[in-house]
Image (tube, rainbow, N blue to C red):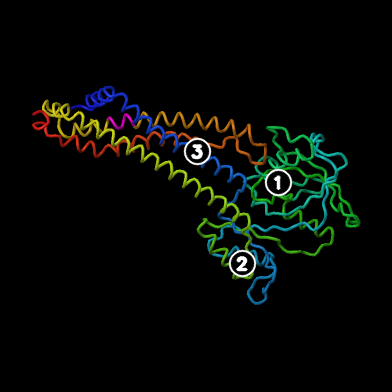
Amino acid sequence: MTWRSLLALAWANLRADPGAALVDVLAAAVGAATLALFVALGLGVGDAARRMFPADARLVEVVPAQLSLGGLLGGGRLDESARQRLLALPGVRAAWPRQNLVVPVAAPEPPLGLEAAWPPGMTLQIPVVGVDPSMVEEDTRRGVPFADPAEGGAIPVVLSRRLVEIYNKTIAPTWGIPGLPAGLDPVGIELPLRIGVSIIPGKSERRILEVRVRLAGLSDRVPLYAMAVPLATVQRLHRLYNRSDPGYGQVTLLADSPADAPAIAAAARRMGFNVDRSELATAERVGTVVRVTTGALVGLALLMTALAALAIARSRAASVAARSREIALLQALGATARDVRAMVLLEALLVGGGGGLLGMAVGRGLGLLGDLAWHGLLPDFPYRPEAILIFPAWLLAATVGVAALSAVTGALTPAAAAARVDPARALS
């Protein structure tokens, strides 16, 4: 028999017993909808966690040891010589130094055009850190060169990408001031600064420099709490204010692959340095919780899908038993055991596929309602995702596929039983 004929027979058999077919479709739909919802929830929470705690598993943050035995172990001061030794470690692709500016910097005025978002009379003390330009090269390709400028030129700066979100969702509402306009591209915005000014009485420098800084980009590789400028700028200001070289506060190592990072961290510790894993550890813990929770939910959804497959298997077995004479007549008319087996499996495929499509639609609809409730019930906060449930195209396709596959798997035993029907005994 042709596949078209077998499909027509399978469809006719389902239409002959619509009640049982509907129950099977609903069972498959429940499993499919549950699977789609739980996986979509895991994807949404995981995406929010990654945006809230961005971390590159290839990065190793090396800092000076609090108690240094550098004279014995080769560690101690984190300077250019130490950076070169760290760069020479196996598996290290780059070593980016970072140095804190020890001269106070203050912002007495807002950026041009953002006066409404600046509290009257406020002077903001700004921590400044110098970073290697190559560390933020991918984030500073918007027309503002990230290099120490000529005298009188605007100093390029890079801010944490998270700062804009936190300002709009936390600082601005707390201060009762407008947030940054939606869609605003902040690259190129300038801010007047006064180098040498401290908001602490008696801590300002005798020499005050009036400078401008220009935003060159936003990056996940700079600290949330500080304004990043080229390392050469910090070193120049230290010389200008007669500050002794404090050394590097941190050296960020880029590993060739995440698998090399643990060995690099261990080697840095043997050299007498510490490794700051606080941000990466937080990201890893959050990621682990999300993966475990999502895995448990998906396991529960798969269990429900398996129960649906079991229900379909029992239904198809009862249908085969009730239609043994019809099956025997088909065999008497020339249908082979393979044709009978394929017919029963096609019935299950139609039931599972239909249930999967229905479950996918129900799951997507419940996801939209969930997102509406999410936005209506919870307050606005930093990194609140636009959608708490994410339904990529592959998930929608997988939902239908898993439902259909589970139904066919459950029907394997009834199909085998149908293929073993003896026409002579069934028709006698």
Can residue 132 be seen? yes
Q: Residue at x 65, y 60 (%)?
A: 251
Up the image or down, 105 lies above or below 324; here it is: below
The residue that mark 3 highlights is 40
The residue that mark 1 highlights is 159
Can residue 197 be seen? no
Q: Nearer the viewer, mark 3 or mark 1?
A: 3
Q: Quadrant of the C terminus?
A: top left
Q: How many marks?
A: 3
Amino acid carrying mark 1 in the image: Leu
Asked if marks 2 and 1 touch (Cβ < 8 Å), the reply is no
**Percent x, y for residue 208?**
88, 52
Disc 1: CA contacts within 10 A as few (<14), some (14-19) or many (>=20)? many
Up the image or down, 175 lies above or below 88; here it is: above
Horizontal side of 5 relative to 123 (left or right) equals left
**Percent x, y for residue 206?**
91, 56
Q: Is residue 100 magenta?
A: no
Foreground pick, 300 / 205: 300
Amino acid carrying mark 3 in the image: Ala
Q: Quadrant of the N terminus?
A: top left
Write down the region rendered in magenta. 347-351
Amino acid carrying mark 2 in the image: Arg
Horizontal side of 287 relative to 14 (left or right) equals right
Q: Secondary structure at mark 2?
A: helix
**Percent x, y for residue 328?**
14, 29
Marks 2/1: CA distance?
A: 29 Å
Asked if marks 3 and 1 touch (Cβ < 8 Å), the reply is no
The residue that mark 2 highlights is 85
